[in-house]
Image (spheres, helix red, strand yellow):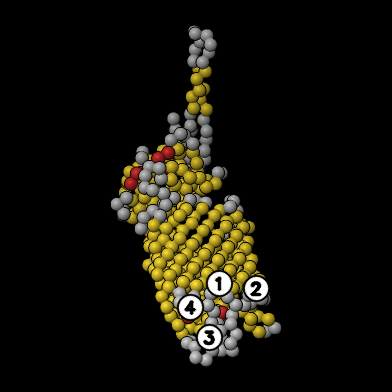
Amino acid sequence: MVKCIGNSSMNKKWLVLCVSVVFGNHFALADSEKTTQQKSQVVWIDNNDDWLQLKSGEVIKGELTGTIKEESNSLDQEIEFDSDDLGDQDIEIKDIAVLETVSFFTVRVASGDIHEGFLSIKDGKLFLRNEVKEWSFPIEQVVSIYRGRQDESEQWKTELFLGLDISKGNTDEFSLLGEIETERLAVDSRTKLKARHENSESDSKTIAKSTSFDGSYDIYLRNKLFFRPLKLSIISDEFQNIDHKEDVSMQMGYFIIAMPHTQWDVSLGPGYQYTAFRTVESGEKENVSSSGLYFESNFEYELTRNIDLTHFYSFNWTSKKNMGTQHRNELGIDIDLVKDLDLSIKATWDHVSNVEPNAEGITPKEDDYTFHFGLSYEI
């Protein structure tokens, strides 16, 4: 038996859930009577909390993050719920008796239609409503739920990084590194943008100066398969003798692992590279271009509640005159300090198989190793 009592005189919405459990006490004597004892649990829920009740009777309050959209579309599909007391919990939708939320969500159903509104689950159905319309669907028709808001800017996640760079290779000096990375996750797509600038001086002389920009747009085709119609990369690096280099590619991708605490996706496809060198030896071309093959891997793992591990790897295969094969390895560790502020540690290895000598005949090194640490802040 569950009773809900509201108090309209207060600004907060309180919910009292009384769960009664009946215990039978059996006596050895045949003529003894059965007695029952009722126990009640009181759960207070603020009007800013999402909450759910399982069919077994347990009540959990916190925040609905969304479905694990990489799971197959079935009654075994799971949601991720950030409990105030238990942390992130994976819960099968079929085990939910009641779910109430206070936020705006985007839902994709088996027909391919996408709807937005405030979400609830009851009696095996998902209800969605906004100021215009209300929908209801059997739970088994739900493909994915994503926490989205009517304000477009709130669907973007941005991270700023400022750190100290200790380098070996073409630059053996200290330098400051700044990065800004932003990502938009939607129910049917993903957009990623990243800008990076490094500048270092010694005795009023610039010894390192590089700038890069990366952007990609992904369209989810199925729960684990995605199409990347555009991947763009722009780089300028004085000590690699690169005035500017542009890479444009189109890729198909797949989520190898897609879990709340671990995610790994890879992508592969053809592309085109254009490179303009700063200076070249006599008789060499200043600008070269060629087609290429592009591969990318993104791995994220939550070591603990406060420590995250990331690894990025990219491989570009172009003509020998256009820098040949190019590898990039990035390993990062983020440690939570306070709220949105992290201590970040990053290590990078860049390799170019065919580097272009400058006009003075100086050939840049094929490998660059960097290690830098600093602070990251999430907006």
Mark 1 residue type? His
Counting residues from the start of the chain, the first of labels 1 and 2 encountered is 2
Q: CA distance from mark 1 to mark 3?
A: 19 Å
Which residue is most to the right? 203
Please tell me whether mark 1 sits on a helix, a strand or a loop: strand
- Of residue 335 and residue 20, the one placed in the foreground of this image is 335
Please tell me whether mark 3 sits on a helix, a strand or a loop: loop
**Crowdedness near tag 2: few (<14), some (14–19) or many (≥20) residues, C-alpha within 10 Å:** some
Q: Is residue 311 left or right of residue 91?
A: right
Counting residues from the start of the chain, the first of labels 4 and 1 encountered is 4
Q: CA distance from mark 1 to mark 2?
A: 13 Å
**Mark toward the viewer: 1 or 3:** 1
Instruction: Check disc 1 and report the residue beneath it.
Output: 351
Q: Which mark is residue 278?
A: 3
Q: Would you identify the image quadrant in which residue 216 lies? A: bottom left
Counting residues from the start of the chain, the first of labels 1 and 3 encountered is 3
**Mark toward the viewer: 4 or 3:** 4
Q: CA distance from mark 4 to mark 3?
A: 18 Å
